[in-house]
C-alpha cells in the first residue's frame, strides 16, 4: 500500500466517522445493529425544548380565548353555565371537583370545543389557568360557592 492510498483511506474513514456521528449509537461503524442497543433513543434536547415552547405558545394562543369564553358563560344561570363552571372547577381543583365527561356531551358545540382546548392547555400549562383571568381566583371561588350551594 503506498502513501496516497493510505491518506485517502484515512480521509475516507474520518468522513465516515463524521457522518456516523449523526446516527444514533444503535449501530456500529458499518451501520449494523449493535445487539441490545436497538431500543436506545437519543433526544435532541434543544430541538425538543424548542418544540415544547412552540406548542405552549400555540396552546396559549388558542387556550386563552377559550378559557375566557368558558368563564364568561359560566357566570350565567342556565344549564350551560353550570356545566362550564363544573369543567372550570375540575381544572381548578380536580380532587374536589372531578370531571364528569357527560358534561362535555351536553354543551353546545362551540363550548365543547372551548372546553377541550382548555383541558388540553391545562395539561401543559406553565401556570394555573385561573392566573390567566383577571380576578381568576376570586371568580373560581365564586363558582365553587355557587356549585356547593353556598352562594346567597
Image (spheres, rainbow, N blue to C red):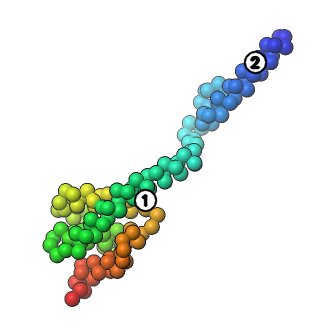
Numbered disc total: 2
Name the mark on residue 9.
2
Q: Quadrant of the C terminus?
A: bottom left
What residue is at 27 percent from the left and 82 percent from the top?
145
Along the line of sight, which residue is nearer the eye, 108 or 93?
A: 108
Where residue 131 sits in the image (x, y, percent)?
41, 71
Sequence order check, earlier mark of 1 and 2: 2
Apparent side of residue 134 relative to residue 86 in the rendered image (left or right): right
Along the line of sight, which residue is nearer the eye, 148 or 111?
A: 111
Outermost top residue: 2
Instruction: Relative to 8, say whether 48 is above or below.
Output: below
Residue for badge 1: 124
Along the line of sight, which residue is nearer the eye, 75 or 112?
A: 75
Where residue 122 sits in the image (x, y, percent)?
38, 62
> How far separated are the C-alphas under marks 1 and 2?
51 Å
Crowding at label 2, few (<14), some or many (≥20) Cα neighbours within 10 Å?
few
- What kind of element bears circle 2? helix
Outermost right residue: 3
Where residue 127 sits in the image (x, y, percent)?
45, 67
What residue is at 73 percent from the left and 23 percent from the top?
13
Apparent side of residue 28 relative to residue 148 in the rendered image (left or right): right
- Circles 1 and 2 in contact, beta carbons < 8 Å: no
Q: Is residue 76 shown to the viewer in this render? A: yes
What residue is at 28 percent from the left and 70 percent from the top?
71
Amino acid at each position: 500500500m503506498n502513501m496516497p492510498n493510505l491518506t485517502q483511506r484515512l480521509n475516507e474513514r474520518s468522513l465516515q466517522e463524521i457522518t456516523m456521528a449523526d446516527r444514533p449509537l444503535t449501530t456500529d461503524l458499518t451501520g449494523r445493529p449493535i445487539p441490545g442497543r436497538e431500543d436506545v433513543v437519543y433526544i435532541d434536547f434543544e430541538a425538543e425544548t424548542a418544540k415544547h415552547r412552540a406548542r405552549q405558545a400555540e396552546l396559549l394562543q388558542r387556550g386563552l380565548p377559550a378559557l375566557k369564553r368558558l368563564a364568561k358563560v359560566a357566570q350565567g344561570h342556565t344549564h350551560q353555565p353550570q356545566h362550564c363552571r363544573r369543567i372550570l372547577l375540575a381544572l381548578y381543583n380536580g380532587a374536589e371537583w372531578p370531571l364528569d365527561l357527560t358534561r362535555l356531551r351536553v354543551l353546545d358545540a362551540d363550548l365543547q370545543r372551548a372546553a377541550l382546548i382548555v383541558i388540553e392547555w391545562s395539561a401543559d400549562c406553565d401556570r394555573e389557568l385561573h392566573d390567566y383571568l383577571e380576578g381568576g381566583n376570586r371568580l373560581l371561588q365564586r363558582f365553587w360557592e355557587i356549585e356547593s350551594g353556598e352562594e346567597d
